[in-house]
Image (cartoon, helix red, strand yellow):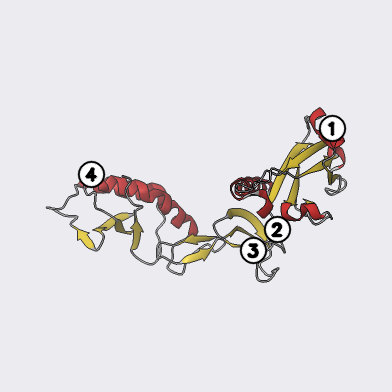
Amino acid sequence: MIETRVCIDDTLGPLDCKLDPTNRWNGWLSPHFPLDSARQLSAQTLQRAREDGYDSVDTIHVIEGCEDSPDTVHIIESRPARYSEDDETMAVAVRVKWRDLDRSAGRSATIADATPQARKAARRRKPGGRGARRAVIVHVRWQYLDEGGDSAANVVRPDRDGLFPIGGWEWAWHFAAWWCLCGSDQEWHTPRCECGVTRDQALALEEAAPRVGAILRRLAPEATAVVFETTAAPRIVMVVAGPTELNLGDGGPFDTETLGEADAALHAALGGDPIEGGAHWLRFPPASR
């Protein structure tokens, strides 16, 4: 198992997880998520369902309580599709025995029909208690719910490390990427690009780029990128506006104070660690209008 991040195109993720990169389903990954990532995934699936309709989206739900909470019932409901004239909604009831959750490896959470009695029980009692926090993850496949059967909705059982294998052997998960300064993309768990830049350095510079750009654009609004060296402290050696190099010396748009401030912003992002491979480009995001 390795620590990495996964996504599904630009619709879900990127999310922290652990996975075995050799454990594939039709080439796709089978990630195991910590609870924080499961919460993020839940929010993303619910947002997609609100936008595209529950009838075309699986949703993930996180139900939270405590180890000493009383038994509870929770109703999970769909909403009509955005462009549908059918106002029908679907629902399931999730029954949780919080005190037995650990001993039964999650099997004390069960899914049943959302009967009137279940709805009444859900209104009557909420998770309480003061013990350790616990969570139940529910995966609902709304497009199959009216067909019945256990495959339409299930409780995602945690693995022995307490991680949740959501969408494994089912969804098209692939590695999230980080982008190096040289323009190449690297799988998230790859710590260093072949050009010498590390992932942490690339992410720090991506965050610093708007700040560096704003400093230089005070005197040269047309600036689009810099070339900097880090053999010692980071130092800007060239500023460009598109294909045109701007003069850094006398007669150019910059003064020593402005260039020093931009160098300091790079130093704040990188610290004193040099970047291998010589000088590197840092491109600015487009200036806000």
Q: Distance between the residues labelled 4 and 3?
A: 51 Å
- Vertical side of 41 occupied by 123: above or below: above
Which quadrant holds the N terminus? bottom right
Q: What residue type is labelled 3?
A: Ala
> Tag 2: residue type?
Gly
Of badges 1 and 3, the one in the foreground is 1
Circle 3 SS class: loop
Q: Which of marks 2 and 3 is nearer the N terminus?
A: 2
SS at badge 2: loop
Category of crowding for the residue at label 4, using alpha-carbon neighbours closer than 10 angstroms: few (below 14), some (14–19), many (at least 20): few
SS assignment at label 1: helix
First along the sequence among labels 4 and 2? 2
**Marks 2 and 3 close (CB-CB < 8 Å):** no
Asked whether residue 44 is in view, the answer is yes
Look at 79% across and 52% down and name the residue there.
146
Q: Kindly identify which residue carries mark 2.
A: 167
In front: label 4 or label 3: 3
State if disc 3 and disc 4 touch (CB < 8 Å). no
Q: Earlier in the sequence, mark 2 or mark 1?
A: 1
Closer to us: 49 or 194 = 49
Q: Mark 4 points at which residue?
A: 257
Task: Work out whether mark 4 precedes mark 1 in sequence or the reverse, and give the earlier one.
Answer: 1
Q: Determine contact: label 4, label 1, CB under 8 Å.
A: no
Q: Which of the marked residues, 1 or 3, is nearer the chain's N terminus?
A: 1
**Is 176 in front, or is 250?**
176
Judge the density around disc 3: few (<14), some (14-19), many (≥20) Cα neighbours within 10 Å: some
Give 31 or 96, whichever is nearer the viewer.
Answer: 96
Q: Residue 172 carries which label?
A: 3
Q: Which residue bears the numbered disc 1?
A: 121
Q: How crowded is mark 2: few (under 14 residues within 10 Å), some or many (20 or more)?
A: some
Q: Tell me residue 214's x, y (percent).
A: 31, 45
Amino acid type indicated by mark 4: Glu
